[in-house]
Amino acid sequence: MTEAVIRKKAGMASVKDMPVLQDGPPPGGFAPVRFARRIPNKGPSAVAIFLGAFGVFSWGMYQVGQGNKIRREIKEEKYAARRAILPMLQAEEDERFVKEWKKYLEEEARIMKDVPGWKVGENVYHSGRWMPPATGELRPDVW
């Protein structure tokens, strides 16, 4: 609505001459405003959360222990199998070593046949102890 319609006359008038029209509350008033902090009472308590977390942790540690037992049994089985097969592997290695040692002594005898007083296979260090080659190779220079 325009001002002229409200005053029922044309032209401008003072604001003071206009009727007072003010907003007010609705009949019966406004609904109360909730301003207090109210935290809902939903969900588990702190004790329940702690006990649940402790239970999950305990179950997890139990599972780790069970896995360690299984892993230990598998490792022991593997070591037992190695201990069982070790004598056979050692016998095979000793047989290979003896064959190579014989070839080595034959080669040494062929090479040193012109050296007077040379004893084939005698240790030149005279330590009194026999030590097998550390690398498993009798003559690493011959390939």
Image (cartoon, rainbow, N blue to C red):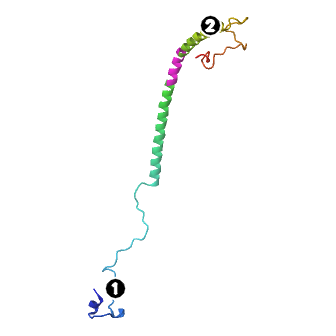
Pick the residue in front: 35 or 55: 35
Residue with the mark numbered 2: 106
Which label lies toward us, 1 or 2? Answer: 2
Which quarter shows the C terminus?
top right
Q: Tell me what residue is drawn at x 60 percent, y 16 percent.
A: 142
Q: Which residues are magenta?
A: 78-88
Residue 94: percent from left, percent from top: 57, 13
What residue is shown at x 47% (from left), y 44% (from top)?
A: 57
**Picture residue at 60% right of the left edge, 9% below the top:** 103
> Where residue 104 is drawn, which disc sits there?
none
Locate residue 140: give its quadrant. Answer: top right
Report if the CB atoms under discs 1 and 2 are less than 8 Å apart: no
- Is the residue 106 above or below the residue 38 in the image? above
10 Å neighbourhood of mark 1: few (<14), some, or many (≥20)? few
**x%, y% of residue 53?**
46, 47
Q: Disc 1 or 2, which lies upstream in sequence?
A: 1
In the rendered image, the vertical position of residue 74 relative to residue 90, given as above or below: below
Q: Is residue 135 magenta?
A: no
Left or right: where 67 falls relative to 2: right
User: Any mark on residue 22, and which?
Assistant: 1
Query: Picture coordinates of residue 54 (x, y %)?
Result: 48, 46
Q: Is residue 128 above or below residue 82?
A: above
